[in-house]
Image: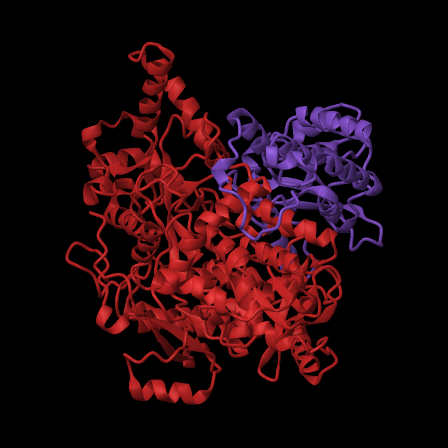
Chain colours: A purple, B red
Amino acid sequence: MNLILKIWRQPNSKSKGKMVTYPVENVSPDMSFLEMIDMLNEKIILKGEDPVAFDHDCREGICGMCSMFINGQAHGPDRLVTTCQLHMRKFRDGDTIIVEPFRANAFPVIKDLIVDRSSFDRIQQAGGFISINTSGNTQDANAIPIEKDDADKAFDAATCIGCGACVASCKNASAMLFVSAKVSQYSLLPQGKVEATDRVLNMVNQMDEEGFGNCTNTGACEVECPKGISLENIARLNREFLISKVKT
Amino acid sequence: MKKNNSKKIKKNGNGKNLMDSNIPKGPLSQKWTLHKSKINLVSPSNKRLIDIIVVGTGLAGASASATLAELGYNVKTFCFQDSPRRAHSIAAQGGINASKNYQGDGDSTHRLFYDTIKGGDYRSREANVYRLAEVSGNIIDQCVAQGVPFARDYGGLLDNRSFGGVLVSRTFYAKGQTGQQLLLGAYSAMNRQIGRGKITMYNRHEMMDVVIKDGKARGIISRNLINGEIQRHGAHAVVLATGGYGNVFFLSTNAMGSNVSAGWKIHKKGALFANPCFTQIHPTCIPVSGEHQSKLTLMSESLRNDGRIWVPKKIEDVKLIREGKLSPTDLNEKDRDYYLERRYPAFGNLVPRDVASRAAKERCDAGYGVNSTGEAVYLDFSAAINRYGKEEAHVKGLDENDADLVKKLGQEIVRSKYGNLFQMYEKIVDQNPYEMPMMIYPAVHYTMGGVWVDYNLMTSIKGCYAIGEANFSDHGANRLGASALMQGLADGYFVLPYTIGDYLTNDIRTGKIDISAPEFEKAENQVKSQINKLLKNKGQNSVDYYHKKLGKIMWDKCGMSRNEKDLKSAINEIKRLREDFHKNVFVPGNDKEYNEELAKAGRVSDFLELGELFAKDALERNESCGGHFREEFQTPEGEALRNDKNFTFVSAWEYNGEPSNAIMHKENLNYQEIEVKTRSYK
């Protein structure tokens, strides 16, 4: 099939960007979206021009590196996938496709479709861990039985890939879904309860400092999350935060 | 490595152990304990005076960075991704082995050790493998304490599953995302240290070269991938945790950015590169669908717990299936060839990966492949869905003979075990694997070969270490499933942080490493001139053009089966391709901006050298073992035929200009505890 791409081009964080139109021909429906961009880039390179820069690595939906905003949706029109898992069979011959970076104040553009998500790392550094040394001198793993239901919920929260689709989809550019996933994982496990108070306060503080917006419960984040992280986690984060505020 | 060693090797030929692997003395089961109690320690106050560089943030790099920082060293960690959490360990699916014996099925340290040595076809280092098995249980304890959400049963205890090449259930897992959960655990431990200022993290930075001063690794030259800045970083030791080199095949299950460059750069500076031809071709990957394909996707080995692999018995049925006139679900049991169960009754669908891959290739080469390219076999869950459905119906007191109900219940159980994998398959292939058997074919997945290290994980450059997939030591000629995660974390959490102290005791009075030293300047200039050369080349082919060509040579001639003629031709073809690359590659843009083509060009340039050494290593190893299958050396039944008399050694290559001029050193493998036998999974 043949398509028209309108892609955000921005040489670096300091200069202004603009949409540039590229026709692409002979796209196979079995290609992934990124393979279609690869094909476009090969042509751009052979013309001696600068290829479209985009983040990608594992190309199997788990590393969280790819991050395009396609036709107004983070990771494009399909549900529960990242851009690398989006296949061209989801589009039709003759379609015009608009490709932009994830947009948020806390995610400045580095080049074209690449944004800087190190704010997510800094939130994790503020408290997204259990303070235990990796010496291996811990108790036997089975000495801490955990109710299966809690363990499963903790796992579901922990599957967040940190891609930032929640932020890009939110009209407030809020990072609540991301932060709540980590807070939930640890608050559901006995190992994480010990420092629960500090964790939630520190992570929420850092989130605010990074310039993410507030949550107004529109739920776009849950819809666009490639891993289906549930809004329930935000409710849990709010409870944890409230309890911690009262305690301190 | 001194040149006179290589002269020695020529005189002595086979049979003399020329590489000293520094294995401690004593009985096998005591070696690690005794070694740990004897090695020198750096005092807490002196650790503050010592800087360590870690390159790579997969399981090995992240766990090592965290542990070294906790111990008190100043750590600088580098990754090319935008966050350490994205390293490719994240994609590991199935699980991690540990000899906890929670299932009471007779597991033990010795059995895990034995299975791993046997799985590696007796080409791994006994003492390292024993240590790995010994610390395996600790890894699980550590990860649970960190909050890694492993799968649990209704009693709240940890669940296990089974993997290929073993007869016990020792694999711990978190659905099909075990690597992700373990890496996020190690990443969280790192984050804690980054927050405390003990780790300085360099995201989107690539190591360009190692700097050696007075025979010791004293730092690296790095490149900031965002603005192209070339930087010098000094340290008292350098640790490479840079993963494997499967992308030399272009198509593999590795991430797009996975590369050999860090390992290859230190190889060119004197580190020996061991067993480059030992590559794992994983049996269950989604088949190639067309020319545009950029990477291959693995379907976890854990699926072989419940999936049965088959092709049709009759070639007429194969034709009808390929033409779309017959559905595999319409084929009777008696018309299906469950070839693994037929050939290997004891292990069935759970034979090791090398065996399963070759068996698939054998059937497809014989014309029984079930997709349009003839390169696919079925992985079928209908029997498991039926079995689980009946069990569930029984438990719930429902009608076990209601086929629709049983199917529905069974599908739910399978979804709870492998949901994310089935979803991945459906998205890529556009077929529902709950209804239709999956189509799978082998693909390059892991490289057992890597930088040569001694028992302390030090390379042949003093003060330079290699851990995780980047080194060679634990998996021999074939890695068992769920052992890579185990090795990465064992090296990073429990081995390297202690062995490195022994070396660093000599550095407590060294002081900061001076990065204005001429060695740094020289290394930096070299890096800059390589970059300029690539950018000034006014060629007409893209970097991918060469990478794809190299991949095709590697897959056709150094892939699942190899022979002398093809390997010799591969060496020549790769050499010519490399010359062409340096004349005709075109790299757009400049070196002061984000330029992925430039980064790729550097990596592909190293792959073009490694590929040649790979083929040479495969050519010199005149035997079949594990993943290295030489057509000339096989049993009448088509099984790998080892030559223990002449090849029970590690080939450790010394760089000597052109890769085909590399000099081979040998580390003889001596087995103290186990009897070397023919591997049989029948």
Question: Residue B452, image x and y in percent?
Answer: 45, 70
- Give the residue drawn at x 78%, y 33%: A174
Q: Is residue B298 left or right of residue A21?
A: left
Can residue B581 be seen in the rendering of this structure? no
Question: Residue B311, image x and y in percent?
Answer: 26, 38
A57, B480: nearer the viewer:
B480
Q: Please say if B280 is above or below B43.
A: above
Q: Is residue B48 left or right of residue B297?
A: right
- Give the residue drawn at x 51%, y 49%: B292
- Give the residue drawn at x 45%, y 26%: B155
Q: Is residue B625 left or right of residue B614?
A: left
Q: Is residue B27 left or right of residue B333?
A: right
B13, A103: nearer the viewer:
B13
B201, A217: nearer the viewer:
B201
Q: Please say if B172 is above or below B579.
A: above
Can residue A125 be seen in the rendering of this structure? yes
